[in-house]
Image (cartoon, rainbow, N blue to C red):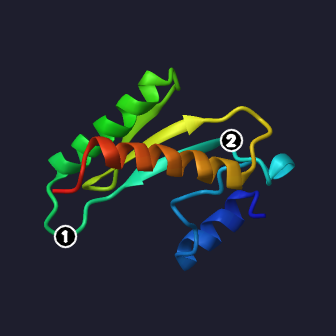
Amino acid sequence: MANDLASLLFLTNLGCIDHNPWSSRPSSERSPDYVFFDLDPTDGTPFEAVIELASVINGILDSLAIKTFLKTSGATGFHIYIPLEEGYTYDEARTFADAIRRNGARKKPPA
């Protein structure tokens, strides 16, 4: 684990620090603190389509009274973060995200 400034700078210089950090703490690495949807457009897809998809997903989560945090990512992407209570596994988080994805696909069929 890189836990000091010199180590972080060294790894940054090598270009090997992922911008998508591990979503759990070292003390509970098998239990994610959050799940997130990383919405990035393909070539030729307008940013408005990403916003529309984010709105559909956020609407589903809102209807379930699930607290979300929204943020832009990069030049044309969007993230929807969902904090999780302690104890969920990565498989459970993935299953949850997939259920939301499938529900969203039913609400907004591909163009």
Q: Residue at x 61, y 51 (%)?
A: 95
Instruction: Give the structural element (helix, strand or loop) at label 2.
Output: loop
Q: Amino acid at mark 2?
A: Asp
Among numbered discs 2 and 1, the one appearing first in the sequence:
2
Residue reaching furthest to the front: 106
Residue farthest right in this picture = 27
- Name the amino acid type tagged 1: Asp
Dots 2, 1 in contact, CB < 8 A: no
Q: Secondary structure at mark 1?
A: loop
Which residue has dot 2 on it?
A: 33
Foreground: 28 or 89? 89
Frontmost residue, 51 versus 23: 51
Q: Quadrant of the C terminus?
A: bottom left
Residue 96 drawn at (x, y percent): 58, 45
- Say which residue appears at 68% left-offset and 58% top-offset: 5
User: Gap between marks 2 and 1, in whole Å?
Assistant: 32 Å
Q: Position of residue 104 (x, y in %)?
A: 36, 44
Return the x and y of residue 71 as percentages of the image width and height. 38, 39
Crowding at dot 1, Cα within 10 Å, few <14 / some 14-19 / many 20+, comes out as few
Name the mark on residue 101. Answer: none
Q: Which residue is mark 1?
A: 43
The answer to which of 97 and 107 lies nearer the viewer is: 107
Where residue 14 sits, quadrant-wise, is bottom right
* Residue in view at x 65 percent, y 50 percent: 23
Task: Report whether 100 appears left or right of 35.
Answer: left
Is 94 on the left or on the right of 108, as rendered?
Answer: right
Q: Nearer the viewer, residue 83 or 10?
A: 83
